[in-house]
Amino acid sequence: MTESPVTGVVPTGWRARLDLRPHVLRVRDSALPILQIVVAATAAYAFAVSVLGHPSPLLAGTVTISSLGLVRDARPRRVLETVIGMLVGVLVAEVFVLVAGPGWWQLALALCVTLLVARFLSPYPPFAIMAGIQSVIVMAVPSQQPFGRLLDGVVGGVAALLVTALIPRNPRRGELRDAHAVFAAFQGAAATAIQALRRGDRLRAERALEKARALGPLVEQWRESLDSALAIARISPFLRPQRAELLRHERIRQQLDFATRNLRVVARRVVYLCDDGMPRPVAADLLGELMRAADLVAQSLADISFQPPAREALRAVGSRLDPGAVMRGASQGDQGLIAALRPLTVDLLTATGMGPADARAALPRI
């Protein structure tokens, strides 16, 4: 089982200060975005100088750098939105330079109009900021060619979009890292709930509920990285073969999103039951078997051959989730906990590729 980030080893003292691994990992993860920016900015600058004859195509480079950036979200749509925002700023400023000339009051008026237009066009705040920055550059830097800087900006934007498709960032690495972070936190929350059930420990049960409630942002981060990966794979000829695998991951993500919500339901029931301080080994064993099967689902992300054994392991657990039979003579609360494991099992079964109807049919009728 993957180590939970909550319980992982955290360096302290001089080790934390001398640990270069985060710096090295940051550089490694940024290597391809840096290559994209260098290639696109150089190509845009060279094209503007050699083909268009512009002596100082400043915006050809700045538009390229700003639109690509080093952010995780490298979707072509985001790049295009950023390019459009900057071109709006360039266009408005070019009009003001042509009509009113340069100057401080012209800059103030051009910046004001640019920001108002940008906010009208897009609800995305950085869109307006990018437009404003380019507007100030156009107003502050003189040029002998009317609308020449707008053409430079178009060249930079086209270069950024071409590089996004032809030198695509690897979407699988970040997406898989986010996926395993979700599974690790999911299993960590369940492991705490299992310990609470074995010991009848309410404090530990409450901690499990806290961990389960903290899963939402991790799932959302995985969704964003998957969306970005799928968007890049749609336009890049080199990543198009990965679309089927990314779509399979998206199906797993959707079902794990449901599973995290059902885990919160299970955790709340565990908190309620642990009020009496009594251990519940049967429920702990069933939840533990579910988590071992969930670990196989996590491994199936990188290797689909783990999918069939994960499905069979979940079938084996699901076939025993009859509250009346497993907890015969137990309280309604104990039987309710077993019943709460059923939708969690169905979610994990559908994450292995099984249809929802077949997944529900794998559980005994109650």
Image (cartoon, rainbow, N blue to C red):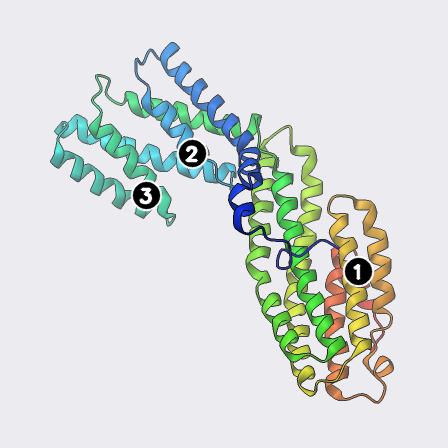
Q: Residues within 10 Å of mark 2 (few under 14, many from 20)?
A: many
Question: Label 2 belongs to which residue?
Answer: 67
Q: Position of residue 207 (x, y in %)?
A: 61, 71
Type of the residue with mark 2: Ser
Camera-nearest residue between 82 and 172: 172
| Residue 128: mark in rendering | 3
Q: Quadrant of the C terminus?
A: bottom right
- Give the alpha-carbon distance from disc 2 to disc 1, as whole Å: 43 Å
Q: Residues within 10 Å of mark 3 (few under 14, many from 20)?
A: many
Type of the residue with mark 1: Arg
Q: Residues within 10 Å of mark 1 (few under 14, many from 20)?
A: some
Question: Label 1 belongs to which residue?
Answer: 292
Which one is earlier in the sequence, the residue at label 3 or at label 2?
2
State which quadrant residue 51 falls in: top left
**Which residue shows up at 53% across the image and 50% down it?**
13
Question: Is 357 displayed left or right of 98 in the figure?
Answer: right
Which one is earlier in the sequence, the residue at label 1 or at label 3?
3
* Pair 1/3: label in front: 1
**Which residue shows up at 56% across the image and 46% down it?**
15
Above or below, 143 against 318 in this view is above
Which one is earlier in the sequence, the residue at label 2 or at label 1?
2
- Give the alpha-carbon distance from disc 1 to disc 3, as whole Å: 48 Å
Disc 1 element? helix
Q: Position of residue 171 (x, y in %)?
A: 61, 38
State which quadrant residue 267 falls in: bottom right
**Which residue shows up at 55% across the image and 48% down it?**
224
Camera-nearest residue between 290 and 11: 11
